[in-house]
Amino acid sequence: MRGIYKALWLNEDKFLEVIDQTKLPFEYETKVLRTTDEIVTAIKDMTVRGAGVIGSVAAFGIYTALREVKSYEELKQKAKLIRESRPTAVNLMWAVDKMMELLKDSNDLINDSLKFAIKLNDDEALESEKIAKYGCDIIEDILKTKNKTRINILTHCNAGWLAVIDEGTALAPIYEAKKRGIDVHVWVDETRPRNQGASLTAWELTQSEINHTIIADNTGGHLMQDGQVDMVITGADRVSASGDVANKIGTYLKALAAKDNDVPFYVAIPASTFDFDIIDGVKEIPIELRSEDEVKYIKGVDKNGDVQEVLITPKDSPAINYGFDVTPARLITGLITNKGICEANFDKIKEKFNL
Ligand code: MRU
């Protein structure tokens, strides 16, 4: 049992403590989440984000809720609030439903909820380790086929340890490559509007001393045409039973460019990211619509080192902010899962995951 995680952990008083991801990369701050309301707010305002970590926080959220209510019936209301805090990443609903199912016959709700939340997180961490290994085997294959020593990988958004316990999904094979002594370089999409690539992925890679270059979101296509991208790896927030992938807005455009340039496009996911109830991801996956302010304002550090948020558009121009898009399965080379590499189609997913 680990009990302590890098993006979140239990503090001395057994409350959940998390890295405040809204403050990175300029400030490292943590937040203690003591109530269900604080859990829900942290997910909504993206103090914590990334599909896996939202699920992890939700699992500990059920335990947190049980410090406020005593019965399973009362817990249902709190669980609903947590479950509805964000709409696209299915790990959130999966974690809440799993916790509620495990607890339904419990005679010791508080202790059992803590035990189950820790176990859920330990299992996710093991899946991340497996994703790292399977993904890195692909990196080695690509280098062998191309007879190269350096791999250039493009990634979108943040799917590292800030997003999924413990090593992430898309970044897990990259961390493993570093461990295996592979010369790895990462093209980091800035990922407008919230810049999870520029602020979080770049920060994670800096911590691990992994070579990387931040690029404006529109640069990937040009780099692919120029032979400077050997593969793309992204994470996902929800994958349909037929292999359609919802991930951060802009992922679809990268997949189109990869297809046009014969660049392998992989999506790394734990089993909790599948939504087997959905077949057609484009039509059925709910896409989060967030505040237009995330498009109109940008955060950074001024010359005095102070964090500032500034308007970058005409004040009255309207903006729209879809958080995610869906990449159809036909554009995906393979899913890097805890059970190995899986083709993104219904039959192969069914076979691998015993549907
Ligand atoms: O809005 P976010 O930052 O929670 O979105 C995160 C992403 O889209 C990640 O790429 C995704 O969660 C995959 S990593 C689990």
Image (tube, helix red, strand yellow):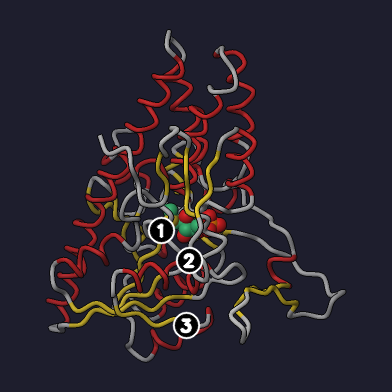
- Amino acid type shown at disc 2: Cys
Q: Nearer the viewer, mark 3 or mark 1?
A: 3
Numbered badge on residue 235: 1
Q: Which residue is mark 2?
A: 157
Q: Is mark 1 within 8 Å of ligand 1?
A: yes
Label 2 lies in ligand 1 vicinity (Cβ under 8 Å): yes
Q: Is residue 6 left or right of residue 94?
A: left
Q: Residues within 10 Å of mark 1 (few under 14, many from 20)?
A: many
Task: Quickly name the residue at label 3.
Answer: 215
Q: Quadrant of the N terminus?
A: top left
Instruction: Relative to 223, say whether 267 is above or below.
Output: above
* Tag 1–tag 2 contact (CB < 8 Å): yes
The secondary element bearing badge 1 is classed as loop
Q: Can you give x and y, in whole percent of width and height, for residue 134 in the image?
A: 20, 56
Gap between marks 3 and 1 measured at Cα: 18 Å
* Residue 224 seen in the current view: yes
Marks 2,3: beta carbons within 8 A: no
Q: Position of residue 292 (x, y in %)?
A: 74, 64
Circle 1: residue type: Gly
Of 218 and 68, which appears nearest the observer? 68
Q: Amino acid at mark 3?
A: Ile
Please tell me which of labels 1 and 2 falls first in the chain: 2
Residue 347, can we see it?
no
Looking at the figure, which quarter contains the C terminus?
A: top left
Against 90, is 190 above or below? below
